[in-house]
Amino acid sequence: MKKIVHNEMMTGPDFLDSLDDGREIYIYGERVRNVAKHPAFRNSAYSLSRLYDALHAPSTLDLMTDIDPDGYRTHRYFMPSRSSDDLLRARDAIAQWARLSYGFMGRTPDYKAGFTATLRSNPDLYEPFHHNALSWYQKSARKVLFLNHVLVNPPVGRAHSAAQMRDIYLHVEKETDEGMIVRGVKMVATSAALSNATFVAQNSATHYQAGAEEDFALCFILPMNAPNLKVMCRRSYEAASMSPFDHPLSSRFDENDSALIFDGVLVPWENVLIYRDIERARSFYRASGFLNRYPLQSGTRLAVKLDFICGLLAKVLASNGSSEFRGVRTRLAEIVALRNILWALTENLCQSPEVRKDGSVVPRLEAAATVRYFGTQIMSQLKPVFNTILGGAPIMQVASWLDMANPQIRPLIDDYYQGNHQSASERMKLIKLLWDALGSEFAGRHELYENNYAGNNEQVRLDMLRHCESAGVMDQCTSLVDQCLDDYDESGWKVPGWQFNPLQSETR
């Protein structure tokens, strides 16, 4: 008997319609009534809608989707993987989505799928709210819901205990029959204005005092239109964009980052995963498999971004006429090497995975932690190369497309702004793209974002070291040193076969 396949995945229009739900979005002193139509968000919303259309397009349907254990078609990364091949296919689906924004939209719906898929693998981790975990997996996978997340307390009062910051940090204020009332603020909610729900938890490095700070140890999922949930947005790079010619990336791929203010928000009990449990609020990251899974999405997206940057640098060098210089080629090679490393790391994540107790698989934690670490290093290694070999080329650009449209100065632009075997129009188009990718305010946000994507600088490194220690990697390393030390002592070689050199023999 043929198995019935259900398809409830949102289409592009479905996704855009889902954003018109009464949510409280604030930017430039006003409340936004419909983010999908507002100048600060509409192009980014449309860019995201294209991801959903790709789930249904005949050319990408099989690449991007599969049937989950409940018989529902979903994005491959929204369901648990059962084998190394499943992880590789999920990686390819992630890459397909990332190419639609050239790697410049990082927190797309497949990012948080790194967590929601684990809700089906081990719902018992959230006892007594295990039914909620399974329910949210089903909601997320069937619709391919877009979740943002907020984990970090605002950067104020860091020297104080959480209890002393109760008037600011998110906490449970009281219980009701319907759910818990929470109050406080959380950050950084990337794309909160454009997502369907928010995942709220504590940063894995957060330490709360048992017996005093349980009110802060919470984990829940909440629709973005929850009453009294306010989304406070930063400046919109999309709204500031003059034209596609001037800002080809920031005009359509701006993931507006927000602070979420919970101004006495009711969180229904069916949305709660962890309640006033300090140990579980800290340990679920590793226990759930989220730390294993999310670097596959983040690493793959960054690898696609590096594909774009390698190609962009190569084209600008050709336009400058310096692409064959030996020193210039060596610096281009450095960027290509970074690109190759990232793609190799994403493939490594899919090989020899860890098996969970339900039989599903996730990338090995030490491999995932390495991707997490390496991703934070990319921009610091990449930017100096561009700054060194391009010189003032990115600066020699017209102010905007309006200069190109001015008949009085266009002939001068055509003469003096041309590239190597390239018209001024082609040259300016390329340089504007370069600037938006690496020099604009949008690019500055991306540099900061990549550096802090995985958490604070020290924690990323300490987590990787701890994961390698617990996995036996460091024992393997030190045992190799011990083996070498056992080969000899002060009297000479302990293993037969090696000889003293003549000088040593004479001395002895």
Image (tube, rainbow, N blue to C red):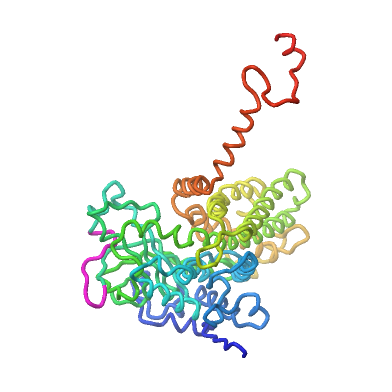
Q: Is residue 240 visible?
A: no
Q: How many marks?
A: 0
- Compare residues 381 and 132 and report the one nearer the observer: 132
Q: Quadrant of the N terminus?
A: bottom right
At x 48%, y 55%, the residue is 454
Q: Is residue 490 above or below residue 347?
A: above
x, y percent for residue 311: 69, 59
Q: Is residue 487 above or below residue 432?
A: above
The verdict on residue 175 being magenta is: yes
- Compare residues 5 and 238 and report the one nearer the observer: 5
At x 69%, y 62%, the residue is 427
x, y percent for residue 458: 45, 45
At x 46%, y 45%, the residue is 462
- Compare residues 352 and 181 and report the one nearer the observer: 352
The verdict on residue 49 being magenta is: no
Q: Is residue 422 left or right of residue 275?
A: right
x, y percent for residue 302: 59, 59
Q: Is residue 61 left or right of residue 231?
A: right
- Compare residues 499 and 424 and report the one nearer the observer: 499
Q: Quadrant of the C terminus?
A: top right
Tell me which corner region of the image, top left, top right, bottom left or bottom right, holds residue 364. bottom right
Which residues, given as a range, are shown in magenta? 167-179
x, y percent for residue 106: 53, 64
Furthest-bottom residue in this view: 1
Q: Is residue 327 left or right of residue 161?
A: right
Q: Is residue 246 visible?
A: yes
